[in-house]
Amino acid sequence: MNEVCSLSLKQLRDAVKRRSLSFREIAEAYLERIDEAERHLRAFVTVADGSVVDQAADLDDRLARRDLRLGYLTGLPIGIKDNIVTKDVRTTCGSRILDNWVPPYDATAVRKLKANEALLFGKTNCDEFAMGSSTENSAHYPTRNPWDLDRVPGGSSGGSASAVAARLVPAALGSDTGGSIRQPAAFCGVVGLKPTYGRISRYGLVAFGSSLDQIGPLANTVRDAAVMLQVLAGRDQADSTSANTTVDNYLSQIGKDVHGLRVGVPAEWMGSGLDPEIKTAVQDTLKVLESLGCRIEEVLLPHTSYAVATYYIIATAEASANLARYDGVKYGYRSSRKDSLAQMYENSRTEGFGDEVKRRIMIGTYVLSSGYYDAYYLKASRVRTLIQQDYLTALESVGLLVVPTTPTLPFKLGEKTSDPLAMYLSDVFTVTANLAGVPALSMPCSFTESKLPVGLQLIGPHFKEGRLLRVAHALESELQLSKPPLAV
Amino acid sequence: MSAKKQVEKVAALAKLRFEAESLERFVPTFEQILDYFEQLKQIDTEAVEPTYHALFGQELETPLRVDECGESLPMEEALGNAPETKNGHFRVPKVIE
């Protein structure tokens, strides 16, 4: 691997500033790296062609003429999850039903990257409509974990996580409805941040669960995640649920000390069902936090055990409504069997959607249907209030929570595909942050003896991403994790 | 109603269809997941208000904008991804006999 690809966003930018690297050299190095590793990983659905080198060369010319403002991401390669729309670039959501869709507009997050003159290096693979925890539900092909090719990269942003971990791009966008940024970040040993609900515009993020969905970055360092958030955060007229709250200076939090900070650990999250290697790694990391001057305290989140049931009622209900738009009329797949309009709808949807998406549409339709609405959807929406109150109460006394990201290490391809409920239960530590709308970050805290990454999750109060990034950066600097060699 | 009939009814609402063989596979996991949801009944939520939006009432309100026409897509682009079009319209199978 070219040494250029091991650099962070910050290091790449600094090298350009010093004129020790050109944008063209960076683009060529990453294209070469993709060429070398992508056939093993299959992290992308669509990969940039040679035109990104022309774009990079153009930026070099402008830089030489002093006609270029060097933004945080100018000229740097970024991957985009394939459920985030890109003008004139095919956006499939990992689904057959959108296999030929070429959006006529950019998502706001993509528009912001382009305004920073970042180079879009391709669309990354994901579970169909972001529904899954392994990227095995992609209609294209599964993506592999770069630390062990027999294992899944997690999901649904598995393509982004795998590509960032294997250095095919220095950073990527993902989306997180119930853990879809954090769980693959944990499985691939990278940093993944799900911001507060509404912190980044959802305009152009193909809707799954609209009250839960949030776009966020995946990167190799905490600082890089902060850089990405700085570029992406903010109010957007096009998304009425985007927050009007002032955007903090996240980068100013990097390098600040964490002395005296109170860190909450919910005892029930460290109990049975947690992989012993993950438990040890998290406990060891808590000791490191203590050595940095943090005070570790036990907190209670009594409704955690109800979170997966609550989440899968609400998320599927919202999904069933959102996915009603795929009818074969305005865009997307249309069945060739279409004797009547009703048949065309049914055939297009039956042929276009994969099994897991159908399952969720079915569950969502059921929990919203007459006679069941109160018992399922309304009930879950009430329990959601209790889950959120648990968080708000706990976060009144402590500054943040530190927990595992996942109950298990990356599993093997095929290991959980026949048991959907088991797959759902693997989201137990991530779904609560979406239900409560709070920000949460996953970072690698250890590698096991079998050289698999362990993810640590930091959860904070609404709009306190800066605090999470400060603590994560302090930990990252203290841990100085040495990563094993990549499998590709 | 049998579980199979129930699933067929929901499928009709969702405009999906399950052939006999896939229905056999689908029904047990559907029931298993709904059974898992039953645990929520253990919690007393009589006095709890539902949450439909995590930050509503705290940081967010429903913003209204002035009702003015903005830019929109040209017709060719709006129709560009349509499976079938005719005379600048989306084309669908005949609805009225």
Image (cartoon, coloured by chain):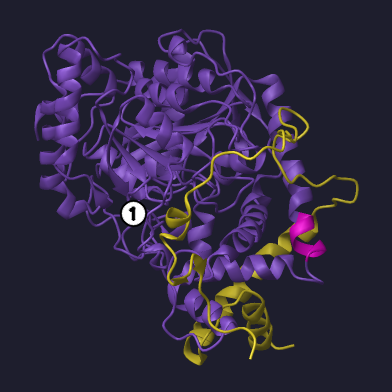
Residue B60 seen in the current view: yes
Query: Which of A43/A64 is in front?
Result: A64
Colour that chain B carries in the picture:
yellow
Residue A295, position as x, y percentages in the image: 57, 15
Give above or below for A36 relative to A297.
below
Residue A296, position as x, y percentages in the image: 57, 20
**Magenta span includes A378:** yes
Instruction: Note the chain letter of the purple one.
Output: A
What residue lies at 49% left-to-right and 65% top-to-bottom? Answer: B88
Question: Which residue is farthest front?
Answer: B87
What residue lies at 51% left-to-right and 92% top-to-bottom? Answer: B20
Give, as a single range, the part of the protein colored magenta. A373-379
Q: Is residue A381 left or right of residue A101?
A: right
Residue B35 seen in the current view: no
Locate residue A302: give its quadrant: top right
What residue lies at 12% left-to-right and 18% top-to-bottom? Answer: A21
Q: Is residue A344 left or right of residue A96?
A: right
Query: Which of A478/A241 is in front?
Result: A241
Residue A426, position as x, y percentages in the image: 49, 53
Q: Secondary structure at mark 1?
A: loop
Residue A160, position as x, y percentages in the image: 33, 43
State the residue position of label 1.
A90
Chain letter for mark 1: A
Q: Quadrant of the N terminus of chain A?
A: top left
**Amino acid under disc 1:** Arg
Q: Is residue A46 left or right of residue A306?
A: left
